[in-house]
Image (spheres, rainbow, N blue to C red):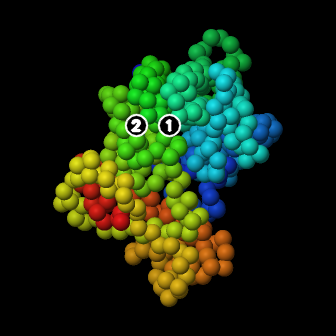
Amino acid sequence: MAYKPKVLKSLKSPGFFMNTRKGTLYQLTNHNSEPLNLNHLIVSQSDFLHCEKLFEVLKEQNKSFKSFIGFSKEEEPKKCIYLSPIDYYKPQQTMEATAKADTVKLYTTRGGYFEVSDDQYYKISKMINPDIIVSLTEIPTGKGKKSHKRSVEKTIGFLDKAISIFRPKSNGNSDQNENHLDKSTLIFGSIEGGQFDEQRKECVQKTLERDIDGVVLHGTESAETIEEKARQIALTMECLGEHKDSLYTVYSSKGTIQDILLGVSNGIDYFEVDYPNQLAHAHQALNLDFDNKNYVDTQSLFSEDILNELKTKQPKTFNMTEYDKHKESLIGFTDGCQCYACQNHTQAYVAHLIKCKELTGTILITIHNVHQYNILFQQLQEAAENQKLSNYISWFIKTNLI
Ligand SMILES: [Zn+2]
């Protein structure tokens, strides 16, 4: 049934998809994001709900969505668009439930919630023509079992619709074939069910019965505790069973360091990530030590101990609003960091920019934070290759969480 297709070959596991704002990286131009090597981008579908005209123009001019968001012809093939109904950047929850079987309400920047049918959703999705489409889902508005049951039923219905649109069976209908722009779009099914084991199991089971390439673990959007997240992940991975080996698994959250360590220790392949931007907006620069020579000798923590550490600790950061602390620091954020910000600027300068409310300060922190995530994932990949992932996670927790 499922296969591990070619499109993600460029993205090793564990890896991440970087959140964007309307398809562009926060405050980063293509020029300054290039050294960061961010090729796997999350596009929030709700940002384009009102853009049918735009897509008509692009079609007339024979231009792709990737060219519209600024990638050159040479860059296009290496950029991977991951199209999702959920967006962690927006201040409001992205979605509200509706009573109808074929609609949800999505939060749009054009002013509040907008009811959208699955037909409309996929019509726009097809025009964006992503490399990966995450099927539409419904985040339950209520906390009760009933709303989770309905969320699972609707989500499976939405998945069927995605499959019928993105993988139409050839039936001699030339119009349909012509409209099927890209046969290589991968379909990732959304897993809902919240804290209700029965609903979550049912959602996994029904999703696996369908022709999909990956699954996205949703139902973790609201303020779950780390224990609840751990339970949801463990149960989902258990239900996936041997399918884990052939399907991509993605964890949908803000992508905090704690989310990533928790997910990786449970075998998740990929992560949606927005947190480096959120930290930068709060003027926090990650202060992580990646000198990991001794990680292989670090004794692996038990999963309960990992959970306790993640529950009570935070990654180390510099608070760049504390001007007096940084005003005489004539070095980059962290020792040996090769990012553009650390190589060219000092903590004193960035603290000065923040004090002056100058946006460049936030941009420099974003560059540094994203770079730190890149190193974290590179080291996780190396540890995974060496079969030393649990040693690395234990080392990282001891070294970098306080
Ligand atoms: Zn740096």
Give the residue at x 39% y 74%: 336
Give the residue at x 31% y 53%: 308
Helix, strand or loop status at disc 1: loop
Image-based side of 167 in relation to 337, left or right: right
Q: Is residue 207 above or below residue 341?
A: above
Give the residue at x 41% y 67%: 316
State the quadrant of the C terminus. Answer: bottom left
When asked about the image quadrant of residue 106, the answer is: top right
Q: Position of residue 389 (x, y in %)?
A: 28, 50
Helix, strand or loop status at disc 2: helix
Q: Is residue 396 visible?
A: yes
What residue is pinned by disc 1? Answer: 219
Q: Position of residue 33 (x, y in %)?
A: 57, 61
Image-based side of 121 in relation to 227, left or right: right
Q: Nearer the viewer, residue 55 or 265?
A: 265
Image-based side of 247 in relation to 382, left or right: right
State the quadrant of the N terminus. Answer: top left
How dense is the environment of label 1, judged by Cα within 10 Å: few (below 14), some, or many (20 and up)?
many
Image-based side of 111 in relation to 9, left or right: right
Give the residue at x 49% y 83%: 325
Q: Amino acid at mark 2?
A: Gln
**Quick check: marks 1 and 2 in contact, CB under 8 Å?**
yes
The mark nearer the N terminus, 1 or 2, is: 1
Distance between mark 1 and mark 2 Cα atoms = 8 Å
Residue at the far bottom in the pictured view: 328
Image disc number at residue 232: 2
Q: Position of residue 42 (x, y in %)?
A: 57, 46
Q: Position of residue 39 (x, y in %)?
A: 53, 51
Q: Nearer the viewer, residue 269 or 2?
A: 269
Q: Is residue 152 above or below residue 248?
A: above
Label 2 beta carbon less than 8 Å to ligand 1: no
